Image: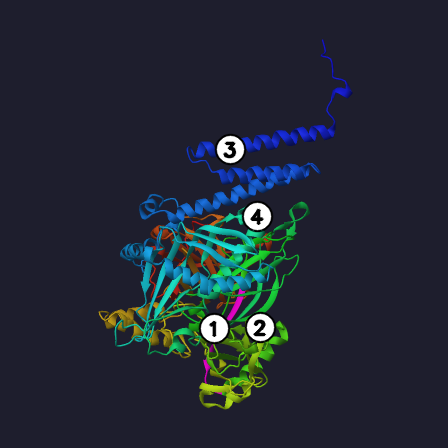
């Protein structure tokens, strides 16, 4: 018997059903949140969080009266907020874990290990962490002064661009957890007037910073900062403390994360919170990421110019040409699709971005830019590729690559394809040129001609010189409106601008700040300086200098010159400056005899900073003869027979190898990112086929014992050539503890024939034990041996 159905008038109306569902959902949400917190915090119920969720639920409920879709947005907000907070809490827990905890998860994650575990050249410094732990309670006042007088003005200026005014610190609590150093490396190949050390820095403390912005109070807690910190002690002096000053800086942007508190926590969503995090990261970069440094003067009688504004080591001119075989992120019909790729280039705090090429996985950018390079050792150029999508924060990651600055400095020029890591496929074509700084004007015309030739295709502004300006002090500034000014100096070179810090209430300010500008053409450009009163925003006086004048000065520099400020009442105001002009000069490329660029660490020890690049050589024999002397100096116990062995192994008597199958030149090294890097340079003297036809060779790699598709790497095919040149680079991610279990198999294949008639025989093979890699001989020639038959083509 059928049950009676309710009449239509007994059913709730659609609007009534919506209201009932809304009431049930939000009531259940509020009760569940309260029960969850009561259960998790027995005896310590968080009233603030309960009120926060309660108010949020009420807001969503009221808005939902207009549309039920707002309930979905409320759920999305709560889920996203919870997920982001959970991930940050997990990172904070890992960062705060002590050494014993890290040892317990060694097998699970090699990346969480201290640097001294992963890299043998990093030494353990637990003794230093004990000292810092003891000193940490006394660091409070120093950190407060740093925040109030250095960070607060920079943050105020940055936030004003987003119409957020009046930023200031209200409360600064350091907490009980000090920073830690997980490893240290001291360089022994530096100048005898300086000490350089790298330290892996990590801070994951219980600090709390409360700030006010536009009369709203908010703050951050659980701040996490980690990165490679460099400390340069220079100059060394003959009185205690024996070190004249310190330069402290991060080589690259550190990883920064934190949790928001107060009003900011309510808006902790993608987009809004990302803006705040990017501002904090940028301010750290402006203060302590190269080319910016944090100087600390320890002795009075030293050259403060060298301490606070040292001359750059050189300039890298970078050309991102193209990419190939990128991942398809915009999937179309029947599995087809492409991407809209662009590339972000970084060196320390310096950043450039290419244009976006739409609907392609093989973009051609031909983008040129230039980076001021402060140090050579242990710094990398980073490349990140993204697929442009609509909406903020929605761009999808396509992969990353990196290039050692030291590699570019050593070779003068590097031109290679670099595979993308953290991506299923893709590689990027990069050309990087090292430019020295010359104190004579002889190379200016040549550099201008090179720039004109490059800009025909790239149309990006390139530069021919570097200008260094040291603003020492000003004297006899005239007070505006009979008040003592708060002066600062603003500098202009072309479209570039710089500003000193403000000096409070003085007619004779001492600035002691330096600035470095790239100059397009010193014959036509000028330097403008204005002394401005911050309180009234009035110009106290200005100086305009034609850069062409400095081309005629001895060594193109002026030291301690007092320049009269035009426009200043009374005409007695002066500005004391040091001005140095340097012309960019293309460095000589270290050649391997075939015109192709060499790789990093080509059979010579790591170079010393501040020394001249190696002179050009014309053959592999000259490279090895040049390397023999420093190798013997590094290892005095080495005998002449060992030197002879090195030469025989790299330059055998027969260029066809001991088996008559030819030889291959490879660079094999283990990188700092837990990756095995292989560069296939070239092959010499491959035999012809039986009918006298030239082969179509390519090189195939496997990292044994894995012979799967993921382990396979291949170069391009070179048609009809017994001496092919590739200069292609490949990478394998591999933990250091697995190196001894792996063998690199390098096979040369002849890809002759068409389709099903193709016969791809192996022409020769080399197998290298990864556990026996020699860091002093990364680039070598290897004789090809008959190939094994355990891999069918």
Is 605 situated above or below 217? below
> Are the residues flagged by discs 4 and 2 in contact, CB closer than 8 Å?
no
Q: CA distance from mark 4 to mark 3?
A: 21 Å
Q: CA distance from mark 3 to mark 2?
A: 54 Å
Whichever of callouts 4 and 2 sits on the residue coming sooner in the sequence is: 4
- Place residue 229 in its image quadrant: bottom left
Q: Which residue is mark 1?
A: 503
Q: Secondary structure at mark 1?
A: loop
In this view, the mark in front (4 or 2): 2
| Screen quadrant of the N terminus | top right
**Is 329 one of the magenta-colored residues?**
no
Residue segment shown in magenta = 429-440
What residue is at 66 percent from the left and 38 percent from the top? 62
Residue 42 location, x and y as percent?
42, 32
> Are the residues flagged by discs 4 and 3 in contact, CB closer than 8 Å?
no
Q: Closest to the observer: 15 or 398?
A: 15
Q: Which residue is mark 3?
A: 34
Residue 313 location, x and y as percent?
43, 75
> Are the residues flagged by discs 3 and 2 in contact, CB closer than 8 Å?
no
Q: CA distance from mark 2 to mark 1?
A: 14 Å
Q: CA distance from mark 4 to mark 2?
A: 36 Å
Please count the marks in the image. 4
Q: Which residue is mark 2?
A: 536
**Is 433 one of the magenta-colored residues?**
yes
Q: CA distance from mark 4 to mark 1?
A: 36 Å
Q: Closest to the observer: 174 or 431?
A: 174
Within 10 Å of disc 3 (Cα), the crowding (few <14, some 14-19, many 20+) is: many
In this view, the mark in front (2 or 1): 2
Whichever of callouts 4 and 1 sits on the residue coming sooner in the sequence is: 4
> Are the residues flagged by discs 3 and 1 in contact, CB closer than 8 Å?
no
Q: Residue 267, which numbered label?
A: 4
């Amino acid at each position: 018997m059928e049950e009676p159905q309710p009449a239509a008038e007994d059913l709730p109306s659609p609007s009534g059903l919506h209201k009932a569902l809304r009431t049930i959902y939000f009531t259940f949400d509020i009760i569940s949140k309260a029960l969850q917190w009561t259960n998790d915090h027995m005896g310590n119920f968080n009233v603030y969080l309960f009120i926060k969720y309660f108010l949020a639920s009420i807001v969503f409920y009221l808005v939902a009266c207009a549309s039920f879709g707002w309930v979905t947005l409320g759920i999305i907000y709560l889920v996203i907020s919870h997920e982001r907070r959970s991930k940050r809490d997990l990172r904070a827990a890992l960062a705060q874990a002590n050494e014993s905890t890290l040892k317990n998860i060694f097998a699970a994650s090699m990346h969480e290990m201290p640097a001294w575990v992963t890299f043998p050249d990093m030494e353990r410094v637990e003794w230093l962490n004990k000292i810092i732990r003891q000193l940490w309670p006394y660091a409070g006042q120093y950190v407060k002064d740093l925040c109030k007088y250095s960070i607060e003005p920079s943050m105020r200026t940055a936030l004003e661009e987003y119409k957020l005014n009046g930023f200031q610190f209200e409360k600064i609590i350091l907490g009980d957890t000090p920073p830690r150093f997980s490893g240290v490396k001291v360089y022994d190949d530096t100048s005898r007037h300086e000490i350089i050390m790298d330290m892996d820095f990590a801070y994951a403390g219980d600090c709390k910073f409360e700030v006010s912005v536009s009369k709203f109070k908010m703050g951050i807690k659980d701040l996490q900062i980690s990165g490679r910190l460099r400390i340069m002690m220079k100059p060394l002096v003959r009185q205690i403390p024996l070190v004249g000053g310190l330069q402290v800086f991060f080589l690259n942007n550190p990883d920064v994360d934190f949790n928001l508190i107060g009003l900011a926590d309510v808006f902790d969503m993608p987009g809004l919170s990302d803006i705040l995090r990017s501002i904090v990261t940028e301010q750290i970069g402006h203060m302590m990421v190269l080319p910016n440094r944090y100087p600390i003067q320890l002795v009075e009688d030293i050259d403060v110019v060298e301490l606070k504004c040292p001359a750059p080591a050189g300039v890298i001119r970078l050309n991102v040409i193209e990419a190939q075989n990128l991942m398809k992120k915009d999937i179309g019909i029947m599995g087809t699709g492409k991407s809209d790729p662009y590339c972000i280039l970084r060196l320390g705090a310096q950043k450039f971005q290419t244009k976006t090429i739409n609907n392609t996985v093989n973009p051609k950018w031909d983008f040129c830019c230039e980076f001021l390079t402060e140090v050579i050792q242990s710094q990398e150029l980073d490349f990140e590729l993204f697929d442009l999508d609509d909406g903020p924060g929605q761009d999808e990651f396509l992969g990353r690559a990196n290039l050692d600055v030291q590699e570019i400095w050593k070779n003068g020029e590097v031109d290679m394809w670099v595979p993308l890591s953290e991506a299923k496929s893709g590689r990027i074509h990069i050309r990087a040129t090292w430019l020295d700084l010359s104190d004579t004007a002889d190379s200016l015309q040549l550099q201008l001609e090179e720039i004109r030739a490059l800009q025909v295709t790239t149309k990006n502004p390139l530069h021919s010189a570097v200008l260094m300006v040291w603003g020492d002090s000003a004297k006899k500034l005239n007070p505006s409106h009979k008040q003592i000014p708060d002066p600062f100096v603003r500098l202009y070179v072309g479209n570039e601008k710089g500003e000193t810090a403000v000096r409070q209430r003085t007619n004779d300010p001492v600035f002691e700040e330096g600035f470095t500008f790239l100059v397009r053409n010193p014959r036509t450009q000028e330097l403008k300086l204005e002394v401005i009163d911050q309180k009234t925003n009035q110009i106290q006086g200005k100086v305009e200098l034609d850069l062409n004048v400095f081309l005629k000065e001895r060594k193109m520099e002026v030291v301690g010159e007092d320049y009269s400020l035009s426009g200043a009442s009374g005409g007695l105001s002066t500005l004391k400056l040091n001005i140095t002009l340097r012309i960019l000069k293309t460095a000589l490329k270290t050649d391997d005899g075939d015109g192709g660029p060499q790789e990093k660490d080509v059979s010579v020890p790591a170079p010393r900073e501040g020394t001249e690049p190696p002179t050009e050589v014309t053959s592999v024999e000259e490279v090895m003869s040049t390397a023999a002397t420093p190798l013997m100096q590094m290892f005095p116990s080495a005998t002449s027979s060992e030197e002879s062995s090195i030469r025989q192994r790299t330059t055998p008597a027969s260029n066809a190898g001991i088996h008559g199958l030819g030889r291959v030149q490879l660079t094999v090294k283990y990188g700092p990112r837990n990756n095995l890097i292989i560069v296939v340079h070239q092959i010499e003297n491959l035999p012809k086929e039986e009918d006298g036809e030239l082969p179509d060779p390519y090189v195939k790699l496997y990292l044994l014992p894995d012979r799967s598709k993921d382990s396979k790497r291949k170069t391009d095919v070179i048609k009809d050539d017994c001496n092919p040149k590739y200069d292609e680079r490949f990478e394998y991610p591999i933990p250091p503890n697995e190196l001894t279990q792996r063998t690199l198999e390098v096979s040369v294949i002849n890809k002759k024939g068409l389709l099903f008639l193709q016969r791809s025989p192996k022409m020769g093979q080399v197998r290298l034990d990864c556990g026996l890699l020699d860091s002093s001989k990364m680039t070598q020639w290897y004789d090809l041996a008959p190939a094994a038959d355990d891999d069918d083509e």
